[in-house]
Amino acid sequence: MPEFEISNRTKFMTESATLKMAQMARELGSKGIDIINLSLGEPDFDTPDHIKNAAKIALDKGYTKYTPVSGTLELRNAISEKFLKENKLNYPPNQIIVSNGAKQSFANLCFAMLNEGDQVLIFSPYWVSYYEIVKLAGGVPICIDSIVENNYKPSIDELKSKLSPSAKMLVFSSPCNPTGTVFNKKNIEDYVEVLADFPNLLVVSDEIYELIIFDTEHISIGSFPGMIDRTVTINGFSKGFSMTGWRLGYMGGPKTVIDACTKIQGQFTSGACSFNQYAGITALTSDLEPSYKMRDEFKKRRDLCHELLQTIPGWIVNKPEGAFYFLPQVNFYFGKSFEGMVIQNSDDLALYLLNYAHTALVSGSAFGAPDCLRISYSLSQEKLKLAIQRIKDALAKLT
């Protein structure tokens, strides 16, 4: 058999921890083991019927051909109107690109904007793919750290300590995966004031969880004075409309940036699925009641999990304001063992809980939080209760 050498960029790329854990959970499940999977960031709700029907109608009408690389004008018009009405962001259609999910939007951006060695500041904890995509595009990720006691909001001093004229981009999400953090108006005002001294820093705001906010309102950083011309806003349909498998996202930003991203996308994927784009129009222009019902159920689950997780000895748990994740600090259990298995880090603890609690969580190391575990509460309240009880029982065996 011939041997083929894999590229260095692939060798140095870390596999997605969320997808890896989900695969391990599925493998155990295929063996008849009852695994409760709290590893994936995927709503357990179906896509609303009116959105599915829009895709079916588009198929029946023959909307199955290539669209413009940046997306159909009809969808970009709908996105532009959504940005203006809901986020106070003035991105005309020629400053918007539709992609195969928000992940591709971010990848397009990095490949379009980064040169080898360019610094990219990332609020940490962060979504797993930010770090790896920046590296893949030749950039150097620099983390702006935060702590659970401050609800994972980086301090102004921490931000100032990492800012420099050589930094090319600043990346954050609100609501945040993996923390559920929502940056309020005062938080963003404070960040904007500091960023004013670095006018050439491109700000990247991932707002994919915008419709899943519980206790506050969503604020787009691009809506603040002086920010729209230096802000790229990423969003999509996966979370708020439960359309993860549809792979449909979008991005608004300065025209030169969007033009560059369109050039990249034209070579990588040509564009997003044509009939999905017509479903996207329906999602953005129809009643959001199904999304609000989903949000309300997530809030109930958040409250339930917050109450139960606080009863686990040694875990430090905050109360997320959005998305559907907890990121408890769990290093209390590092150094403990059971049946010869010593828990050295969060990777070990996640594996231990998979095998002994039959519950799949994700190590915080993948998110820049090595003392933590990520819990996705995108399952029924009954399963969440059972999962947390299993976790407590398994942890009680560690000595």
Image (cartoon, rainbow, N blue to C red):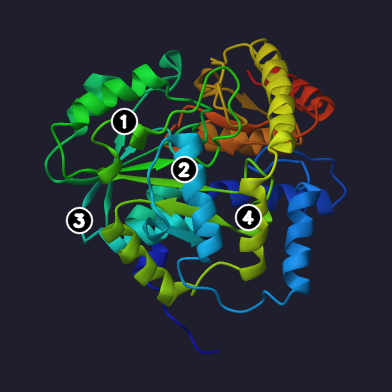
Front residue of 382 and 368? 382
- What label does residue 292 carry, if any? none
Q: Earlier in the sequence, mark 1 or mark 4?
A: 1
**Measured Cα–Cα span from mark 3 to mark 1:** 30 Å
Q: Dot 1, crowdedness within 10 Å: few (<14), some or many (≥20)?
A: some
Q: Earlier in the sequence, mark 2 or mark 4?
A: 2
- What label does residue 83 carry, if any? 2
**Measured Cα–Cα span from mark 4 to mark 3:** 37 Å
Q: Earlier in the sequence, mark 1 or mark 2?
A: 2
Asked if residue 397 shows in the view, the reply is no
For label 3, the residue is 117
Task: Please report the residue visible at 43 percent of the width from the left and 52 percent of the height from the top.
Answer: 251
Q: Amino acid at mark 1?
A: Phe
For label 1, the residue is 224
Instruction: Report the side of 145 relative to 21 (left or right).
Output: left
**Measured Cα–Cα span from mark 3 to mark 2:** 33 Å
Q: Dot 4, crowdedness within 10 Å: few (<14), some or many (≥20)?
A: many
Task: Please report the residue visible at 25 percent of the width from the left and 24 percent of the height from the top.
Answer: 158
Q: Quadrant of residue 117?
A: bottom left
Q: Amino acid at mark 2?
A: Phe
Whole-percent x, y for residue 264 in the image? 37, 70
Work out whether 326 lies above or below 83: above
For label 4, the residue is 280
**Measured Cα–Cα span from mark 1 to mark 2:** 14 Å
Front disc: 3 or 1: 1
Work out whether 76 lies above or below 380: below
Work out whether 213 lies above or below 20: above
Q: Quadrant of the C terminus?
A: top right
Task: Please report the residue visible at 67 percent of the width from the left and 74 percent of the height from the top.
Answer: 63
Whole-percent x, y for residue 292 in the image? 69, 31
